[in-house]
Amino acid sequence: MLDFRKIAFLAIILIFLPLSGLYCFDAPFDTPSNIGTSGLMETPSARTIRENSYTFGLSQIEPYRYFYIVFSPLKDLEITGRITEILDVPVSKKDPKWKGYGNYKDKAFDLKYKLISESMFLPAIAIGIMDPHGTRLYSSQYIVASKQIYPFDFTLGFGNGRYGKSQLREQGEGFKIEMLQNPLDWLRESKFFGGIQFAPNDKFALMIEYSPIDYHKQTRDPAQKKHFTRPVQSHVNYGLRIKPFDWMNIDLTYQRGREFGASLSFNFNIGKPLIPIIDREIKLVEDYFSFENRIAKSFKLAGFSDISVKSEDNKLIISFQNDKYFYTPKAIEVALKIVNQIDDIHFENVKLILKSNGIPLLSFTTDRETIREYFNSEITKGELYQLSILETDVYEKTDGESFYKKKLRYGFKPSLQTFLNDPSGFFKYRLGVSLWTSLHMWDGNSFVAAIEGYPINTVSTVNEPLSVPVRTDLPFYMEEKISLGRLMVDQINKFSNEIYTRLSFGFLEIQYAGLDFELAKPFLNGRLLLGINTSLVKKRAIGSPFKLDTIRGKDLYHTGFLNMRINIPEKDVFIDFKTGRFLAGDFGTRISISKFINGVIVTGWYSFTDTSVFKDTLNSGYHDKGIAVSIPIRLFEGSDSKSSYLYSLSPWTRDVAQDISHYNGLFDFIGRNHKLYIDKDRFRR
């Protein structure tokens, strides 16, 4: 029997969708739905959050509780990671091993891409892919259109799976997208959804939507047997959206004809400092015995170390290490500002050599008149670089005395490490601090020690290590509240033609000790980096910081990789390929895609390896995957800093596609110190 209320509601949307003659932005209708994706309540819209912004929040509509984070690494692209907790539905009532896990929890990620931006006559049109991997409990693919007749925003969509006639099948490893792989089935299995938002101002909005979800037919949903034995009372949902601040949203909703729901979310720009970064005044100091001492002291006060100064053939040559400034062009500008104040030494040209641990990274050569014109605002920063010479094939040591060389460095970093999905508890963690020190006796050399202390530590496991336990025994190492994180020697060298090498040996990380060698070289002005890496390691003993393991696993593990990084500075994206033999002996490739956003680096990785070396079912056929984020400390300090905090997260601890943790990997050591990125970073602050 036809439901004329549904038909009438969707007809209203169809009538008004194409009528607007105004060009509209996604705001203020780019707020999250129940599951995080921009939309209404249960259904998505064609809106996406701002590029380089992120939203995180939680919502609860019985029996579901959602935790989500959404971010937009590229214009019109929205990526959502979410956890769905089903209240009062345990994972297993029979197996005592799962007693501490609590309610059933499902992990998923969603993608939405806006194909067409809204214009005078066309609506915004987006496609979405929900939960294409794993259990696919809440999977769907949809196409959706949204159009504003301000203050109204009309949405009409068409999707399968969660929004369609039947629930999609489990996929396991790999990905399943019916919309692309079997479009005729997608058409047959899809249903319409839609909604209207009314926002008379930026502070609140009213919502009404038609949600086609047939909960009682979603038989693979663990919530179905207990909570949805019958059809829901209504497919029309109502909501009030409140925005007390630009960065906060609160939703109060009435859904399915009987459930009240609430949602709280926060939206921020990625990489925007919480405390404005204030530059210190840069001055040339006076009253020092020699001009070398005076320049060196000025550079030290500006945040540099290991400074040498030489004047020859009418050229002033200054080499130094940048200890303070996140962006290399900023360090160059600070150095030039000091040079511009020198008026008692005759020179026509200036050559700046930037080093890291005594290794020259690049040189910047210009003339005195160009520096004067730049600081007098007679030429632009772009013209300064056009009139100067930037070289990265710099490897020879500079002559002369080195001032303010820091042979001993030390510091600490707060550390948060997480361990997910153990049957004894879904979320376990340890919170503490890592104390480190490094001794630098000669160029490129580091003697490194790190002690980690975790006074708050909930990590434990009821699982046994798997067939080739290169990482599945990691929880036993993480259970220690105090551990020796590293005790090693690291040596980096740079040769002609920009060839870098690195050799490390000692206790390389919390689990492994041994040797680690790497070679790398940039090509095409840094567009491409190629390298090789091999390691020979043995496991460390648990609970004995200076001993090697004689019980677990085999005697030695070795790896060998061909590494490649493709830099795409136009989009601030770089892609890493690690191909070869991993720790467990599985051969394959791990692909990492990273987005640089105002200093924050967001990374996602996925592996493809031959898992036939594993005899257990959990590793066999598995693809290692995860995300990581590197956050500069300068966002919180109010002053510039090179330090960053790294946090990584993987849904499961497996042995597939595993490598040791590398100290000072060469691709990251080279970093953004090549021409392509210098040209881009010179306009950053």
Image (cartoon, grey):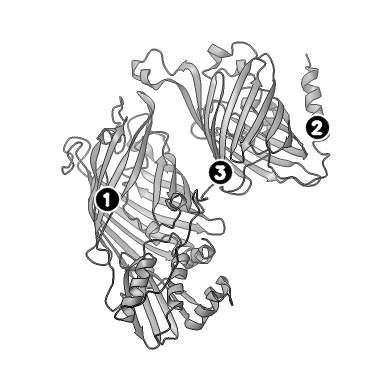
Sequence order check, earlier mark of 3 and 2: 2
Position of residue 345 measured from the top left corner of the image (x, y, whole percent)? 39, 85
Q: For mark 1, does the 10 Å Cα neighbourhood hold few (<14), some (14 to 19), or many (20 or more) residues?
A: some
Residue contact between numbered discs 3 and 2, judged by CB atoms under 8 Å: no
234 to 377, vertically: above or below: above
Between the residue at mark 3 and the residue at mark 2, the CA separation in whole angstroms equals: 34 Å
Disc 1 marks which amino acid?
Answer: Trp
Could you tell me which residue is drawn at 56 percent across and 55 percent down? 571
- Which residue is denoted by mark 2 in the rendering? 14
Where does residue 566 sit, x and y in percent of width and height? 48, 57
Q: CA distance from mark 1 to mark 3?
A: 32 Å
Residue 43: quadrant of the picture = top right
Type of amino acid under label 3: Phe
- Pick the residue in front: 338 or 632: 338
Nearer to the camera, 84 or 568: 84
Mark seen at residue 436: 1
Q: Locate residue 117, reporting x and y percent.
A: 71, 46
Q: Quadrant of residue 533?
A: bottom left
Quadrant in which the N terminus appears: top right
SS state under label 1:
strand
Q: Is residue 654 left or right of residue 252?
A: left
x, y percent for residue 236: 71, 21
Q: Could you tell whether 429 is left or right of 50 in the image?
A: left
| Dot 2 alpha-carbon crowd within 10 angstroms: few under 14, some 14 to 19, many 20 or more | some
Q: Earlier in the sequence, mark 2 or mark 1?
A: 2
Give me the disc on residue 268: 3
Q: Amino acid at mark 2?
A: Leu
